[in-house]
Amino acid sequence: MFLRVLNDDQKRVLVVIAHHLVVSDHSISEKEGDLLDELLNGLHTNVPVSPQQLYAKPSLDVFDTREVKIAAMLEILTLACGDNMFPDAESKMVRKLARDFGFTNDEFEQMKAWGENNAVLRDQALAMMDAT
């Protein structure tokens, strides 16, 4: 949704963060898998991510403006909240990411609420598409 504001290096790191998120609770729901596929398909880039990069700690230094930090957080929260579950492992990881980006708890809660609302709206849209 907000990938257009990210450059290729930021997109690469976002993929790594997303990978860390979905494996953090050792369970990938079908919805979570679909959202990850949407994220990857939406990147519109041929920037490769090696297996070594997927498992390494990503450097957040590439997120150098508030705009790209918010874009990355909203993409990650779309993934984290999109399956209507926010397990403790995912919550801790996303909260740490917000702190590392320099967001206050209030800012994080605002972005998290957006992610939860986005998940509800996505479910409603999918239900409309499935209606016969």
Image: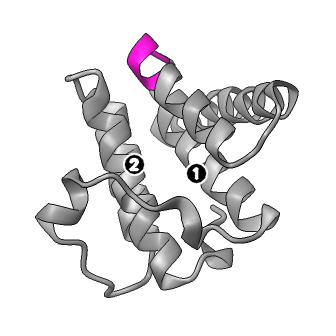
Instruction: Name the disc covering residue 75, or none.
Output: 1
Which image quarter holds the N terminus?
bottom right
Labels 1 & 2 near each other (Cβ < 8 A): yes
Q: Where is residue 2 in the image (x, y as percent from the top left)?
A: 66, 64
Q: What stretch is highlighted in magenta?
A: 86-90
Label 2 neighbourhood size at 10 Å, few (<14), some (14-19), many (20+)?
many
Q: Is residue 115 above or below residue 4?
A: above
Separation (CA) of disc 1 from disc 2: 9 Å
Q: Residue 50: which quarter of the image?
A: bottom left
Q: Who's the residue at 65% across and 27% down the image? A: 120
Label 1 neighbourhood size at 10 Å, few (<14), some (14-19), many (20+)?
many
Rendered image coloring scheme: one colour
Specify whether residue 3 is in view: yes
Q: Position of residue 89 (x, y in %)?
A: 39, 18
Q: Position of residue 64 (x, y in %)?
A: 69, 71
Q: Is mark 1 on a helix, strand or loop?
A: helix
Q: Who's the residue at 83% across and 30% down the image? A: 110
Q: Mark 2 points at which residue?
A: 18
